[in-house]
Amino acid sequence: MPFRLVTYGKEYGLPWWERNSSVYCQTDTSASDYGKCYNVFVPWHKAYFVETDTATYPTLPCESDGTCIRITNPPFFYTLDILYDFASTGKQGIVKWFYSLTHCSITLYEYQPHFQGFIVPNEVDNYELIPTSVLAVTNPFGSPPFLGYDPLINSWIYVDRYKIPVGYVNEYMHNDSFFMTKLMVGITIRRFNRIYFAGKVIAGVLMETSPIAVIPLDYSEYLKYNELRRAFGYSTDGINQPGWNAADMIRVLKELFPDRAWMVLDDKDSMLYLWNVNFPDVPEWLLQRLSPTSVKVLKSPSSLDAEKSLFTLLEQRNNVIQ
């Protein structure tokens, strides 16, 4: 079975183009700028700030600035995104490598062998997938900065990779294979209050070649339709959503989303089916990703609104700069 490599990238207040970003938020309640976040990449990607006291702090400065997402009821593990979910289709992804850089006011400490303050991959809510044996093997549980490496899972962590005014820089890299039907990313914050975190993530995933549905969906929207989940899996990039049969995927999309623009690529003959899309309008970057050899228009658009919305959302989710 041939495979293709899909790369996922997510930003949470940290821009990709800065290697040593100076993003931080003020967590000292005695400071005049408490609750303000600095150098955050906005408006699309924001930092996160935990403040449970809504009476004393009805609105934080970072909320007013539009630079943070506030958490008022912090869980132990906070899920940031679902990168893909193929469980309902019986398909599987192979996570080959994962990298994250996190700015956070908490990090690894003695007697707390959790990846707290690190954005990590996992498959189930409130469960950290990545083993923590690296701490026992390479780190004497001293104070940061430190570097830890686990040769068994080919993973390394780096605390205080560089300095920021408030908090730690927690860096994590994994280069091995995890077979996962669902890939989530999240961060352990241990229900702490008055902390912040920001970060960026990139993951390389191998997926078996199959028909794919090209339609950007919110995960909640995807879960709402049982027939949709049976037809194909979810992918946050809106492109690599695999199914078993292109005809079934087209049938379900026609039924559920007759007014939206979408595409289906049949891998058997590399045929690209278009719905409410004009082929000359398909961006070059998307054609390079799909590599179709032939095209069939199922429905021409009566207006260009749906088509424009499709391409705009795909560009945003795939960090395409036009």
Image (tube, rainbow, N blue to C red):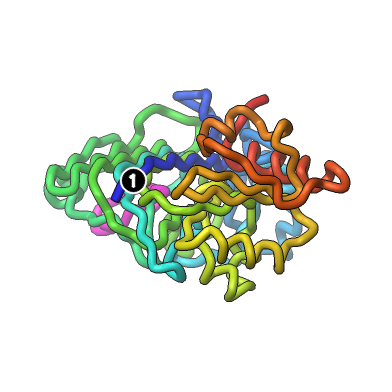
Position of 321 relative to 4 (above/below): above
Residue indicated by mark 1: 3
Q: Give the magenta range.
A: 107-119
Q: Residue at x 51, y 52 (%)?
A: 212
Q: Is residue 311 left or right of residue 108?
A: right
Is residue 57 in view? Answer: yes
Q: Quadrant of residue 45?
A: top right
Q: Is residue 262 left or right of residue 125?
A: right
Q: Residue at x 18, y 40 (%)?
A: 149
Residue 294 is one of the magenta-drawn residues = no
Q: Position of residue 126 (x, y in %)?
A: 41, 68
Position of 294 relative to 188 (above/below): above
Q: Residue furthest bottom?
A: 226
- Report the front residue among 119 and 301: 301
Q: Position of residue 79 (x, y in %)?
A: 49, 59
Q: Position of residue 60 (x, y in %)?
A: 71, 50
Question: Hey, what amino acid is under mark 1?
Answer: Phe
Report the quarter where the C terminus lies. top right
Q: Is residue 28 left or right of residue 64?
A: left
